Image: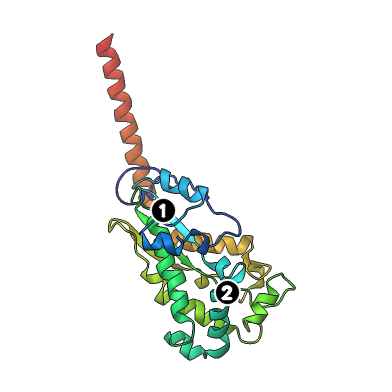
Amino acid sequence: AGGGAGAAPPAARPWVVVNTAVEESTLGARQPSLLRSLVGAAPPLLPQDEFLRDHLAPCDAVCISAGGNDVALRPTIATGINMIMLVKRGSVASIRAGDAWGTSHFEGLFGTDMQRYVAALCSKCAPARVGVCSIYFPDETATGSWADTTLGLLGYDDEPAKLQAAIAMIHERATSHVRAPDARTRVVPIRLSEVLDGKVSEDYVCRVEPSASGGRKMADLIWRDLGLGVDAETAAEAAAAAARDDAAAAAATTATEAAGG
C-alpha cells in the first residue's frame, strides 16, 4: 500500500509495503462453495485478506501472486488430473494453442477464480492498480528438493518445455483477462517467468521457491510493471514541490498564531 492522494499510485512519494500473504494457502480455499455460488455470495476470505480489503485506499496498489500452491502443493483431484493430462497428452504446440486437454480447467482456476478473489479484495474500495502475477517457471535442475516428485510426475525433468508452455498459455488466456469490479482500477498482468525462467538454479530454493536473488528479480519486475518506480528528475521535482507545500503550511500556521496572539 502507498501513501498520498489521487487516483494513481503516488510514485514520487515513499511507499510502505504490507505483506498479507499466507504460507501454503491456495486460491481454491478462497472460493465459494457451490451453494454459496448459486446465491451469489462472496467468496470466503482469510483474516489477512480481510485486513487488506478493509484498509485499501484509492491510491494503493495491490499485488497478487496465487495459484501455484493449487498445482504444486495442494491440488484438488480435478486439478491434479487436468494438469497431468495437459502435460502428458498435450504437445508443446497444442498447449501453446490452448487446444490441449485441461486448458479450460486452468482458465477457470487462474481466470474466473482469480477474478472472484480480486473482486472480493476490492469490494470496499477500488485501489489504483492491481497486479496479478502468473506462475514463474520452476528450476529445471533436480536438486533433491521436496518438489522433485511433483515435477517428475509432470514430466518437467525430461521435457520442461511442456509445463513452461502451460504456464505461458495460462498467462495469456487467463491471467491477462482478469478485471477489477471498478473500471477505475487498472489491472496489470505480471509474467514472473520473464525473470524466473528456470535456467538459473541460484534464483531458487527447492526448485519452486525464490531465493534472495530470485526474490529481488521478482520485486524489480513487479515494481516496474506496476509503474511504481520514478526517475531521479521526477523525484527531485516532487521533493521540491513537497518542500514548498510544507513551507507554505508552516507560514500559514505562523500567521494564524500571530493573528490569534
Residue 230 visible in the current orientation: no
Q: Describe residue 251's horizontal placement relative to residue 155 as left or right.
A: left
Q: Dividing the picture into quarters, in which one does residue 257 lie?
A: top left
Q: Are marks 2 and 1 in contact (CB under 8 Å)?
A: no
Q: Amino acid at mark 2?
A: Ile
Kind of element beneath mark 1:
helix
Residue lying at 44% horizontally and 44% vertically, measured from the top left: 14
Vertical placement of residue 231 versus 143, above or below: above
Crowding around mark 2 (Cα neighbors within 10 Å: few <14, some 14 to 19, many 20+) is few
Position of the C terminus by quadrant: top left
Q: Could you tell me residue 213's position as x and y percent?
A: 61, 63
Vertical placement of residue 255 versus 242, above or below: above
- Judge by depth and name the residue closer to the eye, 167 or 77: 77
The residue at which mark 1 appears reads as: 121
- Residue furthest to the top in view is 261
The residue at which mark 2 appears reads as: 77
Residue lying at 52% horizontally and 70% vertically, measured from the top left: 135
The disc label shown at residue 23, or none = none
Q: Earlier in the sequence, mark 2 or mark 1?
A: 2
- Judge by depth and name the residue closer to the eye, 58 or 150: 150
